[in-house]
Amino acid sequence: GSTFKPILVAGALEEKIMPVRVQLAEVDYPSDAAKPAERGAVTVTLVTETQEMSYPAEYVEPGVFEARIPVETLAAGTYAILVNAELAGALPAAASGVVVLY
């Protein structure tokens, strides 16, 4: 199985890119032994009032994946972030959060 904890880091709208870092661990069941994931497919979805935009997250280092979301067309406000992670042979994992752009 796999678990992860999203860490949302929002830059100012002037930067035009919002990096979203995801911590991902492979968890061995039933022992619950966890190790930083070195592979997997991670997708970050930004939800606005009118659409959902998905971006693949790239592997950065063991246990860390990052998606870079363009925000130049977004107005200041609060948006939902959904993170999905999949790994062959494991149950998919999902988490959500909120980001405020200003």
Image (cartoon, grey):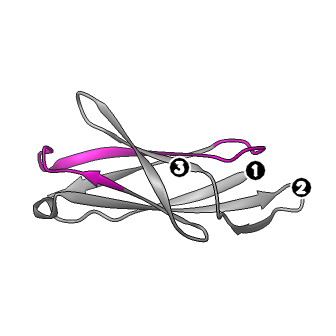
Check disc 2 and report the residue beneath it: 30
Region of the chain picked out in magenta, as a range: 68-92
Residue 96 percent across, percent down from the top left: 46, 47
Check disc 3 and report the residue beneath it: 42
Residue density around tag 2, few if under 14, some if 14–19, many if 20 or more, within 10 Å: few
Q: CA distance from mark 1 to mark 2?
A: 10 Å
Nearer-N-terminus badge (1/3): 1
Seen at 14% across and 59% down, the residue is 13
Discs 2, 3 touching: Cβ within 8 Å: no
Discs 1, 2 touching: Cβ within 8 Å: no
**In the rendered structure, does residue 81 fall within the stretch colored magenta?**
yes
Residue 76 percent across, percent down from the top left: 13, 50
Q: What's the amino acid at mark 2?
A: Pro
Q: Secondary structure at mark 1?
A: loop
Residue 100 percent across, percent down from the top left: 24, 55
Q: CA distance from mark 2 to mark 3?
A: 24 Å
Q: What's the amino acid at mark 1?
A: Gly
Q: Residue furthest top?
A: 50
Residue 9 falls in image quadrant: bottom left
Residue density around tag 3, few if under 14, some if 14–19, many if 20 or more, within 10 Å: many
Residue 1 circle label? 1
Nearer-N-terminus badge (1/2): 1
Q: Nearer the viewer, mark 1 or mark 2?
A: 1
Residue 75 percent across, percent down from the top left: 11, 45
Residue 45 falls in image quadrant: top left
Residue 72 circle label? none
* Position of residue 65 in the picture relative to residue 92 (left or right): left
Q: Is residue 56 above or below residue 102?
A: above
**In the rendered structure, does residue 45 fall within the stretch colored magenta?**
no
Seen at 61% across and 71% down, the residue is 62
Seen at 78% across and 44% down, the residue is 89
Q: CA distance from mark 1 to mark 3?
A: 14 Å
